[in-house]
Image (cartoon, rainbow, N blue to C red):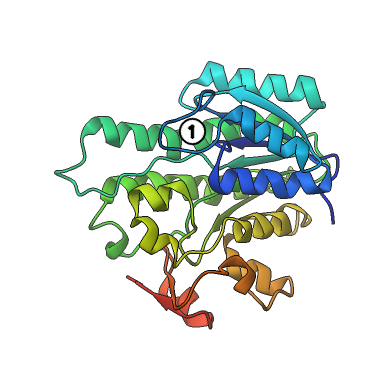
Amino acid sequence: MSLKGKTLFISGGSRGIGLAIALRAAQDGANVTIAAKTAEPHPKLPGTIHTAAAEIEAAGGRALAVLCDIRDEAQVESAVSQTVEKFGGIDICVNNASAISLTGTLETEMKRYDLMHQINARGTFLVSRTCIPHLKKADNPHILNLSPPLDMAAKWFKNHVAYTMAKFGMSMCTLGMSAEFAKAGIAVNSLWPLTTIDTAAVRNLLGGEAVASMSRSAAIMADAAHAILTSPSREATGNFYIDEEVLRAAGVSDFSVYSPGAKGPLAADFFVPDAVFARSDTKITGKY
């Protein structure tokens, strides 16, 4: 199936995984709104809403770049309204925007705590809530949250409880909304990577070049998202998908294309349940 003519609203998609999902959709001829905070070049981070829009159009899609802080309800409502005005509706909502701080309780300032919860949990709820009236009118509506499986093991909380709470807040939106809107035919799912993904967050916050060299490219998340978003919404909801497992189910067996420079085991991502690693034959290091 194709996303041709479908309209995606993506939060925080000016770089990384969000942009990769946008570009994969654009290859099909999709319409994409990039709703993010970066309008001017950042000294340490690549990409802006405008460069993302240019890449989307170069890839074959139509783009709308909207300056939007998803903590601000009025800005979210405006971004959604602009999307509907330009493209005629919304078929897919991708909650990609996220904030991270891998700090313990005493090292986490309340300003940082509030930022993570306002963007991750509250932002996902707000963006979804604002898009849902339009999704109800779509033929195959999807909400996709880039958030982990709800694995309530203490090991995921003990070193960075504030971040885990905020990230699991996104996943709780998946759990609740998938049931709430099942009768409306809106699929609500989460997607999370088996391995670390080579993004600015990994390079700047989570280990630098050493971890990046053991990571997969964002293309694996984009391809997995495409597989989810083209599935029948009434048949695939309430799932906490892992990228590799989605693609294996779709018939992919060679994953080397996603990590061409890796010379050894790949780095495990956070929040992946032990049972998932047990099912995979990918060589992984750094598991919790």
Measured from the top left, where is residue 172 in percent x and y?
Answer: 47, 48
Q: Pick the quarter of the image with the N terminus.
A: bottom right
Measured from the top left, where is residue 102 in percent x and y?
Answer: 28, 50
Q: Is residue 215 left or right of residue 55?
A: left
Q: Quadrant of residue 258?
A: bottom right
Residue positioned 14% across, 44% down in the render:
106
Q: Residues within 10 Å of mark 1 (few under 14, many from 20)?
A: many
Q: As rendered, which of 42 and 106 lies closer to the eye? A: 42
Measured from the top left, where is residue 235 in percent x and y?
Answer: 75, 59
Residue positioned 50% across, 67% down in the render:
194
Q: Is residue 276 left or right of residue 4?
A: left
**Mark 1 — residue?**
123
Q: Is residue 53 left or right of residue 68?
A: right
Q: Is residue 168 visible?
A: yes
Q: Is residue 7 visible?
A: no
Q: Pick the quarter of the image with the C terminus.
A: bottom left
List the single residue furthest toward the left.
106
Q: Is residue 261 above or below residue 113?
A: below
Q: Is residue 82 left or right of residue 14?
A: right
Measured from the top left, where is residue 45 in percent x and y?
Answer: 45, 38
Q: Is residue 80 above or below residue 245?
A: above
Q: Secondary structure at mark 1?
A: helix
Q: Amino acid at mark 1?
A: Gly
Q: As rendered, which of 126 and 179 lies closer to the eye? A: 126
